[in-house]
Image: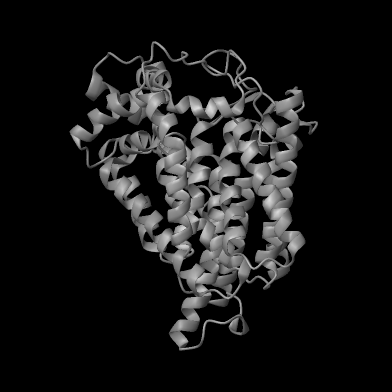
């Protein structure tokens, strides 16, 4: 059981980044292909079922985690608001599943027995994945994308719910930027989500990781630079800025506060003129906002466009800024404690009808998901948001405990990185649906599982009055 479950985790870990390419070229029908896109989730559920069966067979329940009660409360609350609003139960189940589908992976990692080499193997595997993705992304930026890298187009209907898996849209509204890289994830957004997590792990490794050799440290340093360059090539401005924000966060929690103060001072002095004259300056004298989807813009200029007045005006009128101020403002002022249910279409239509009458076309409602916390309030209400943020707080607190107490250098890296990742998830979810995308959700809960497996071990030692040392590692 120990060997098979561990190798199953290795397989999932290595398969997910290349899933789009692997499945695309399988000689199967569109329907089978569509069903296989749920294969990773089904595999995770099977692993969770095996772990549960083992505990039921042994009649020995393991100690829990800090997430158990708030997660069950959140699920129960979601069912309650579904019943209250008479929302479609199947749609609600699908909506809740999208948000929590990788939580079983967290519990599998928390409760299976792994060797002391497991975190090191995961770390090395992550370095290999980062290396492959960054090289492919660089090639795509300089040479160009072709059909090899695009996902296979198909449609699948399950229980009346339509799932569309399509090629990248090249229209003005839904296309991707010229020069964009997508790695093997099938979309630049998914690649960016993965790279933000990867970048945080690499920075944590450089900051506090007792790496095995100088060669490994130089490799991590090189991959850090490559991953940052690849983030620029995704043309996801928010992802680049949030990845860079991981640096001061990791330095702050790892004790490098004096260095952090110096770096921040230098950074503020260097960037102040750009921000001041770009945003506050006369928009008539500055170049207008150029959409990189219709004209090539180099990745550096694309980022600095954020600090121009024309970009601010554009986003406040047509993009996420408009959603945040016009729709989000209405939601906050109405202070809806209970959401409309996890059933997305039902909840969005009900919220839009109540707040805006018939002024917003139904076809435009899904754009609210681009500012995910606004959509989250519609689905789950202020109470649901508070419960979910409490779950994130528990993740943050537990990760900090592991970072400060684990003797394992690789678990220390993952714990420190995850402290930053949890914090970054809050602003990140204002611009992307982080937790519902596999590229974020899978690795987020995988690292959480690694960290909280160690949390359970450390707490067990603490309860027994034993020192928190590697010699006391006995497995879960």
Q: Position of residue 13 (x, y in %)?
A: 67, 52
Identify which residue, 390 or 381, lies in the foreground. 390
Which residue ends up furthest to the left in the rendered image?
334
* Image location of residue 411, percent across then percent down: 59, 66
Q: Residue at x 56, y 40 (%)?
A: 193
**Residue at 26% over, 21% down:** 353
Is 117 drawn above or below residue 379 in the view shown? Answer: below
Colouring chosen for the image of the structure: one colour
Residue closer to the observer: 73 or 146: 146
Residue at screen point 48% across, 35% down? 238
**Is residue 464 rendered to the left or right of residue 24?**
left
Specify the quadrant that holds the C terminus.
Answer: bottom right
Going by the image, does 105 lie left or right of 386?
A: right
Q: Quadrant of residue 49?
A: bottom right
As drawn, 289 above or below 386? above
Q: Is residue 152 left or right of residue 397?
A: right
What residue do we see at 40% from left, 54% from top? 392
Which of the 4 quarters of the picture holds residue 320?
A: top left
**Vertical position of residue 465 compared to residue 43: above or below:** below
Spot occupied by residue 50 in the image (x, y as percentages of width and height) = 61, 63
Q: How many marks?
A: 0
Which quadrant of the rendered structure holds the N terminus?
A: bottom right
Q: Residue furthest top?
A: 284
Q: Is residue 29 visible?
A: no
Q: Quadrant of residue 274?
A: top left
Say above or below: 252 vs 231: below
Residue 283 seen in this snapshot: yes
Q: Position of residue 243 (x, y in %)?
A: 53, 44
């Amino acid at each position: 059981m120990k060997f098979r479950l561990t190798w199953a985790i290795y397989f999932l870990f290595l398969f997910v980044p290349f899933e789009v390419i692997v499945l695309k070229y399988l000689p199967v029908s569109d329907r089978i292909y569509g069903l296989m896109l749920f294969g990773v989730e089904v595999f995770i559920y099977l692993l969770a079922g095996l772990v549960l069966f083992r505990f039921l067979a042994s009649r020995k329940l393991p100690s829990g985690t800090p997430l158990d009660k708030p997660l069950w409360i959140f699920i129960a609350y979601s069912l309650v608001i579904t019943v209250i609003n008479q929302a479609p139960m199947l749609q609600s189940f699908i909506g809740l599943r999208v948000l929590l589908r990788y939580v079983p992976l967290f519990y599998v990692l928390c409760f299976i027995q792994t060797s002391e080499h497991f975190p090191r193997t995961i770390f090395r595997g992550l370095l290999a994945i980062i290396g492959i993705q960054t090289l492919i992304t660089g090639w795509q930026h300089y040479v160009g994308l072709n059909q090899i890298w695009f996902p296979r187009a198909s449609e699948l209907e399950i229980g009346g719910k339509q799932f569309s898996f399509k090629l990248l849209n090249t229209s003005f509204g839904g296309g991707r930027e010229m020069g964009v890289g997508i790695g093997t994830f099938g979309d630049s957004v998914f690649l960016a989500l993965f790279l933000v997590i990867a970048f945080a792990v690499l920075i944590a490794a450089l900051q506090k990781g007792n790496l095995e050799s100088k060669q490994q440290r130089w490799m991590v340093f090189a991959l850090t630079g490559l991953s940052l360059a690849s983030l620029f090539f995704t043309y996801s401005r928010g992802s680049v800025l949030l990845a860079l924000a991981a640096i001061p966060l990791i330095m702050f929690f790892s004790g490098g506060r004096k260095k952090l103060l110096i770096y921040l001072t230098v950074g503020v002095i260097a960037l102040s003129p750009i921000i001041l004259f770009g945003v506050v300056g006369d928009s008539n004298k500055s170049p207008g906002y150029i959409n990189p989807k219709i004209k090539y813009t180099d990745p550096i200029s694309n980022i600095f466009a954020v600090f121009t007045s024309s970009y601010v005006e554009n986003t406040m009128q047509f993009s996420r800024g408009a959603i945040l101020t016009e729709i989000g403002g209405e939601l906050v002022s109405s202070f809806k404690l209970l959401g409309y249910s996890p059933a997305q279409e039902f909840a969005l239509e009900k919220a839009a009808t109540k707040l805006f009458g018939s002024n917003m076309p139904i076809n435009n409602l899904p754009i609210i998901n681009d500012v995910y916390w606004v959509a989250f309030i519609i689905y789950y209400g202020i109470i649901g948001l508070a419960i979910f943020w409490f779950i994130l707080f528990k993740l943050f607190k537990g990760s900090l405990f592991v970072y400060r107490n684990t003797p394992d250098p690789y678990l220390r890296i993952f714990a420190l990185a995850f402290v930053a990742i949890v914090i970054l998830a809050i602003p990140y979810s204002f611009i992307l649906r982080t937790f519902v995308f596999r590229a974020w959700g899978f690795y987020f809960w995988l690292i959480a599982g690694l960290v909280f497996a160690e949390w359970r071990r450390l707490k067990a030692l603490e309860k027994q009055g034993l020192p928190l040392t590697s010699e006391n590692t006995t497995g879960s």
